[in-house]
Amino acid sequence: MNKFFTLCIGLFAFVFLTNFVDEKGAIKERLEISFDKHTSFAELVRIKEQCEKLGIILSFKNIEYNSHGELSVLSFTADCQDGFSGSATSDDIIHINQKFGFFRDYRKDAIIPFATGYFQ
């Protein structure tokens, strides 16, 4: 199962980069990163690396897992380096039913271009 999971993450990273980046390397759509109780530490590292490739600085301030290996607390800062940045903290990731993370909408007609925390 771990090999399958790693393959999925690798495919996600590839699709992520090809679908959201134009020929000049600029993001052309809405980028959404969300975390849940199943997000492993290795995934956090991969997400951070992928964000860096896109020019987004993602920093984790507090990461805690419970005794079952579930992500329970997460605090992060996202800086898109284009005037949009923010941070969020959740101390109850296990019980939330919403997305927790951040998004940056690069489309010109975006109503909300950036948000951190809980969103739909």
Image (cartoon, helix red, strand yellow):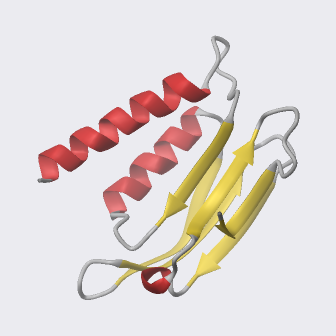
Horizontally, residue 40 falls left or right of residue 54, namely left
Q: Quadrant of residue 21?
A: top right
Furthest residue toward top: 23
Relative image position of residue 111 (x, y in whole percent): 87, 48
Residue drawn at x 33%, y 64% as measured from the top left = 40
Instruction: Return the residue nearer the eye: 7 or 107.
Output: 107
- Depicted 116 relative to depicted 45: above or below: below
Pick whichever, 9 or 50, lies toward us: 9
- Residue at horizontal 37%, vertical 54%? 43
Residue depicted at 49% across the width and 64% down the height: 35
- Which residue occupies the foreground of this view, 31 or 69? 31
| Residue 1 appears left or right of 65 | left
- Counting from the top left corner in percent of width and height, residue 42 is at 32, 56
Q: Is residue 41 left or right of residue 95?
A: left
- Give coordinates of residue 75: x percent, y percent: 58, 74
Quadrant assignment for the C terminus = bottom right
Q: Eyeballing the image, is 118 above or below 112?
A: below
| Image point (33%, 33%), residue name | 11
Note whether 38 is above or below 91 in the view shown: above
Q: Is residue 8 above or below residue 73?
A: above
Residue 58 position in % (x across, y down)? 60, 54
